[in-house]
Image (cartoon, coloured by chain):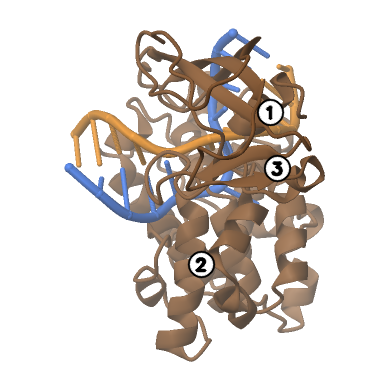
Chain colours: A brown, B orange, C blue
Amino acid sequence: MLLTNPHPLDAEAVLEWYDRHARDLPWRVSPQNRKARNRPDPYRVWLSEVMLQQTTVAAVQKYFLRFTSLWPRVEDLAAAPLDAVLREWAGLGYYARARNLHACAQAVVRDHGGVFPDTAAGLQTLPGVGAYTSAAIAAICFDERIAVLDGNLDRVLARYYALPVPVRDAKDALRGALQIAVPERAGDFAQAMMDLGATICAPRTAYCLVCPIQPGCVATREGAPERYPIKPEKAEKPVRRGHAFVMTDASGDVYLQSRPGKGLLGGMTEVPTSIWAEDAGEPIYPATGEWRHRGQVVHVFTHFRLELEIWSVTVSPEALDGGWWSEPAALKGEALPTLFRKVLAQAGMG
DNA sequence: AATACGGGGAC
DNA sequence: GTCCCAGTATT
């Protein structure tokens, strides 16, 4: 893919805009503060970047504050039990991130003396740190002059070059075009471009009149910047169906168990369910008792839609093994993903 | 090159 | 309802 815009990306204009309009975020060092030679803590930047993978700033903030309060340094996180990390990550989604986060903290402590590598190449060897995150940390923490290409930049550059194909078919070309533009203030530039994408060149609306790179933007000149990026058509989500079983004992405690360590919701806590398939089939109750149907929970994952029939019962706790009984007041602290919080709420244990 | 992998915020 | 978000690992 050849990018034909004759106007190079104007990094100076972007930085000038950023100096006046940078977002104030808990993991960020302001451009004014950076000019006083202050750089952010790589641990905090890494933690924020992992949390922000496919996740909005709004959703991340309270998790970031909680994690840094519980575990202020990478050694603290490395020393924590994985279960504790999963409990705190519950609700944020993409739970492989939490498992990799913990493994990464331990790798930094064990293999790097508690100090994060200071290059993108070194960072990318760590668990859960890929092309984007390694570049972001290297630029933001160490001003490595490297292209930091995330979903925001995909959109900004697709518009700037009026990219006629889906971004995934021109990733290398976009990275190359961006790389050439990276200035000495690489960290501020990376954050500036992401702020630009989040606030000016937004997905549904582009506020071109206030955009610092509007003069070179081909999509703006064409008159319909929101037309870009070109989207590949998305496949229809299949539906899976099943049953979920909420058991309480005489004292009102709820039966919980752990999911397998990998795969969907890996390592997280659940109530027993049937297999999930195209047909729910008849419920096979995990214990005998007077089961009551409590309606349905619908939950949409990235690649399928799940419809669970909810059943509840009061049982005596003998014939169950492998799990544990949790007091209702303790449910908030369990590693329950949103799906199973919805299931418990539907069963009256919310 | 495709696919698996969550959840919620903003409209 | 829809869109899509500071992506990575696996196949």
Of label 1 and label 2, which has the lower sequence position?
2
Q: Residue A117, image x and y in percent?
A: 45, 81
Disc 2 packing (10 Å; few <14; some 14–19; many ≥20):
many
Identify the amino acid type marked 2: His
Q: Secondary structure at mark 3?
A: helix
Same chain, labels 1 and 2: yes
Callouts 3 and 1 close, C-beta under 8 Å: no
Tell me the residue at 56%/34% (across/down).
A271
Identify the amino acid type marked 1: Leu
Residue carrying label 1: A344
A342, above or below A9, in the image: above
Same chain, labels 3 and 1: yes
Q: Looking at the image, which is closer to me, A196 or A217?
A: A196
Tell me the residue at 50%/18% (across/down).
A243
Residue carrying label 2: A102
Tell me the residue at 56%/24% (across/down).
A245
Residue carrying label 3: A59
State which quarter of the image contains the N terminus of chain A.
top left
